[in-house]
Image: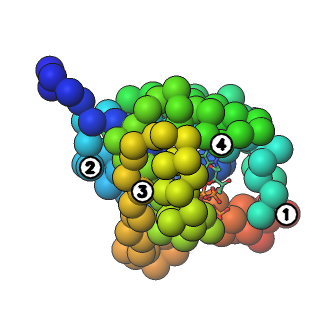
Amino acid sequence: MTANPTTIIAQGTFDILHPGHLHYFSEAASLGDELHVIIARRENVTHKEKPVLPDRQRRDMVAALEMVDEAHLGHTEDIFVPIERIDPDCIVLGHDQHHDEAAIADALAGRGIDCEVRRASAREPRYDGELLSTGHIVDRILELRG
Ligand SMILES: Cc1cc2nc3c(=O)[nH]c(=O)nc-3n(C[C@H](O)[C@H](O)[C@H](O)COP(=O)(O)O)c2cc1C
Ligand SMILES: Nc1ncnc2c1ncn2[C@@H]1O[C@H](COP(=O)(O)OP(=O)(O)OP(=O)(O)O)[C@@H](O)[C@H]1O
């Protein structure tokens, strides 16, 4: 066991899991010893279509992945509450997440949380038809079954 394990945080909606999510988790996990994932609350997903699956189901699927040590439902009002509790060494933002790294770093510093903020890489499709976005999977379902 590591004496001072480093804790990494990844976060997002994770509505219908796909290999892009697995890439993000693997990369985040490789940056430390323990990977904690925060699952966005449905009510806070306002920048795109609401998730199809309930909060707990999205949390339980992420928690079952081998590279994930713990999956937490996000806070409903203050995104920094789970961060304060987990006390991470590094927060890894997804390659396309709208959050501003510097603004998050400032907010963390303002709350006295000593934590690095990094940006993950993107995973591109490896074969024709591979779907690496929940939105694209939903579109495909509607096209085939709608
Ligand atoms: C550091 C950090 C912590 C977050 N914590 C929460 C949280 O506690 N509750 C929540 O509903 N959303 C939280 N979010 C927001 C979502 O996880 C996510 O970033 C946002 O909904 C965008 O989701 P998407 O990347 O899946 O599109 C957090 C975001 C960041 C960057
Ligand atoms: N192809 C991908 N490569 C790397 N990371 C990804 C990829 N797709 C999603 N992620 C990351 O996974 C996290 C959660 O993403 P999210 O749940 O919004 O999935 P999504 O498939 O991008 O959804 P949507 O298509 O609805 O926008 C984010 O940090 C996002 O950057």
In percent of the image, x 42 and y 64: which residue is there? 119
- The CB of the residue at mark 3 lies under 8 Å from ligand 1: yes
State yes or no: discs 1 and 3 in contact (Cβ < 8 Å): no
State the CA–CA distance, disc 4 to disc 1: 36 Å
State the residue in front, 33 or 14.
Answer: 33
Q: Report the residue marked by disc 4.
A: 79
Q: Classify 10 Å Cα crowding around label 2: few (below 14), some (14-19), many (20 and above).
A: some
Q: Classify 10 Å Cα crowding around label 3: few (below 14), some (14-19), many (20 and above).
A: some
- Give the mark nearer the N terminus: 1 vs 3: 3
Quadrant of the image containing the C terminus: bottom right
Residue 93 visible in the displayed image = yes
Amino acid type, residue under disc 4 in the picture: Ile
- The CB of the residue at mark 1 lies under 8 Å from ligand 2: no
| Front position among marks 2 and 3 | 3
State the residue in front, 40 or 140.
Answer: 40
State the residue in front, 110 or 18.
Answer: 110
In percent of the image, x 61 and y 40: which residue is there? 80
Q: Secondary structure at mark 1?
A: loop
State yes or no: discs 4 and 3 in contact (Cβ < 8 Å): no
